[in-house]
Image: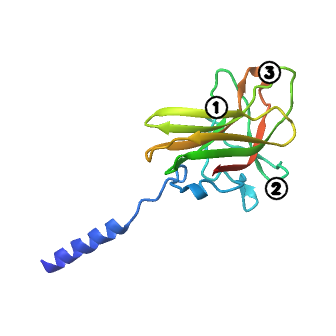
């Protein structure tokens, strides 16, 4: 009987000491390290999505990378094509839990493949607050430059402990005349100011 009780106690102790691993797409973070400063879409010289989740406009698409980089460094950048209507946009997201209320800033370097007169549906960067299923979104255009440029979005968030915050980079959407007009993103920063 003592051996049985000892075995049950050791098993209970073992299983209670095991912790669940956090989902890399939805890390619990504190405000001072809400996101790695200057996240580049590469690791050890290879393309890298990290904790981002890719949302393709076509279910068969995979994330694309190209050897172009902003002036801040790196080798590889994430390439998001503009989607044709009525497809959903090509985007990547990363979600955070455990943030506290305050002013947050999302910034990133981006550029467009080419400009067409009057038909440049813009991509965007967004901060999305989810409070019990109610979404609140702040969005900034990625611009229409074929040169690397910094895009910055600032949002004041009033957060409850149960709220999540998602950051999104989106490739935009338009008619077939803009298909293939890719956007590149890199050197992304999300921080509490």
Is 158 or 129 nearer to us in this picture? Answer: 158
Q: Residues within 10 Å of mark 3 (few under 14, many from 20)?
A: few
As drawn, the label of residue 99 is none
Do the residues bearing badges 2 and 1 touch, measured as CB atoms within 8 Å?
A: no
Between circles 2 and 3, the one closer to the viewer is 2
Q: Quadrant of residue 116?
A: top right
Residue 189, position as x, y percentages in the image: 69, 50
Residue 26, position as x, y percentages in the image: 52, 49
As drawn, the label of residue 73 is 2
Marks 1 and 3 sit apart, C-alpha to C-alpha, by 18 Å
Between circles 1 and 3, the one closer to the viewer is 3
Quadrant of image for the N terminus: bottom left
Marks 2 and 1 sit apart, C-alpha to C-alpha, by 30 Å
Residue named by callout 3:
177
Residue 54, visible in the rendered structure: no
Residue named by callout 1:
58
Q: Residue at x 18, y 79 (%)?
A: 3
Q: Earlier in the sequence, mark 2 or mark 3?
A: 2
Q: Residue at x 65, y 56 (%)?
A: 36
In this picture, is 94 found above or below 34? above
Q: Earlier in the sequence, mark 2 or mark 1?
A: 1
Q: Residues within 10 Å of mark 1 (few under 14, many from 20)?
A: few
Q: Secondary structure at mark 1?
A: loop
Q: Residues within 10 Å of mark 2 (few under 14, many from 20)?
A: few
Q: Residue at x 54, y 33 (%)?
A: 136
């Amino acid at each position: 009987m003592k051996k049985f009780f000892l075995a049950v106690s050791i098993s209970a102790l073992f299983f209670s000491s095991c912790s669940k691993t956090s989902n890399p797409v939805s890390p619990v973070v504190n405000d001072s390290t809400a996101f790695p400063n200057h996240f580049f879409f590469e690791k050890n010289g290879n393309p890298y999505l990290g904790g981002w989740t890719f949302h393709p406009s076509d279910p068969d698409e995979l994330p694309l990378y190209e050897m172009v980089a902003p002036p801040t460094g790196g080798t590889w950048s994430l390439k998001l094509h503009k989607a044709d209507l009525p497809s959903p946009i090509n985007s990547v997201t990363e979600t955070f839990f455990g943030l506290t209320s305050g002013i947050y800033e999302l910034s990133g370097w981006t550029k467009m493949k080419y400009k067409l007169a009057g038909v440049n549906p813009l991509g965007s960067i967004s901060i999305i607050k989810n409070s019990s299923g109610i979404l609140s979104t702040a969005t900034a255009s990625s611009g229409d430059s074929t040169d690397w440029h910094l895009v910055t979005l600032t949002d004041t968030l009033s957060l409850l402990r149960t709220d999540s915050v998602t950051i999104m980079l989106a490739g935009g959407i338009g008619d077939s005349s803009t298909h293939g007009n890719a956007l590149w993103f890199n050197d992304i920063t999300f921080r509490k100011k």
